[in-house]
Image (cartoon, rainbow, N blue to C red):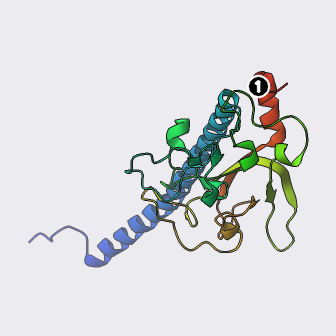
Amino acid sequence: MRRACGFTLVELAVALAVIGLLLGMLIVPLNAQVDQQRINDTRKQLNLVTEAILGFAVANGRLPCPASATVPNTTPGAGTEARTGTVCTAALNGQGVIPWATLGTPETDSWGNRFTYRVTTALADDPTGGLQASFTLAPTAGNQGDITVTSGGATPVDIANNVAAIVVSHGKNGVGAYRTDGTQVAGATGDELENADVDATFINKIPEPAYDDILAWISSNILKSRMVAANRLP
């Protein structure tokens, strides 16, 4: 009689274990590649957003106001500047999310969360109705940015002062960001909390397990340089 040919249960178990190990080795690099691609895509989006902000400033003589962070994107008027008369809505304190509808830019980063946006309100007011720039070249308080970017940590070092506007992606974990339904992702602590509270200090540092925010900012000097080149400032 012929013996039946085939794998024993032990051989099958060993084969499945080897296949599982190989698949696990492939999945880890693949996940890392996906994460890096999303980081790269978000950086490109941030460049697009900052260019749109500068273009808006050249066209309107001022920086755009933030949009309300808590308005769902299904609500009429979502993603537009929050303004009261000629100034940014006071309740926002100059901070909200990117006015994506006003600027024509993406609403969210690569992880599906809105970009936090803070502006120096003195550079976003519109006292002349767009007839001329709302600020001048003079290095006075009303013509300089009031946002500071630091290195964070126990002994922070200033990276940039007099920042006119800043945009934040809250990264893969998304803590501190606002979703498209207007709710905020809870759980921000430490340096990430600094980028989610409503003050003029932000932190930019090398990503680590407890920090994955990505920032882009516009200095007062760059803003004024663009305005001068476009003949919007003398």
Residue 190 location (% of width, % of height):
70, 74
Residue 81 shows up from this direction: yes
Q: Is residue 156 left or right of residue 115?
A: right
Residue 179 location (% of width, % of height):
47, 59
Residue 225 location (% of width, % of height):
82, 30
Q: Indicate the quadrant containing the C terminus: top left, top right, bottom left or bottom right.
A: top right
Residue at the limit of the structure toward the right, as seen here: 139
Write down the quadrant of residue 14 in the picture: bottom left
The answer to whether residue 14 is above or below residue 139 is below
Q: How many marks?
A: 1
Residue 126 location (% of width, % of height):
68, 38
Q: Is residue 218 left or right of residue 171?
A: right
The answer to whether residue 170 is above or below residue 84 is below
The answer to whether residue 210 is above or below residue 74 is below
Q: 9 or 88: which is nearer to us?
A: 88
Q: 100 or 23: which is nearer to us?
A: 100
Residue at the limit of the structure toward the bottom, as seen here: 10
Q: Indicate the quadrant containing the N terminus: top left, top right, bottom left or bottom right.
A: bottom left
Q: Disc 1 on helix, strand or loop? A: loop
Tell me the residue that label 1 is attached to.
232
* Amino acid at the residue labelled 1: Arg
Residue at point 55%, 63% (across, down): 174
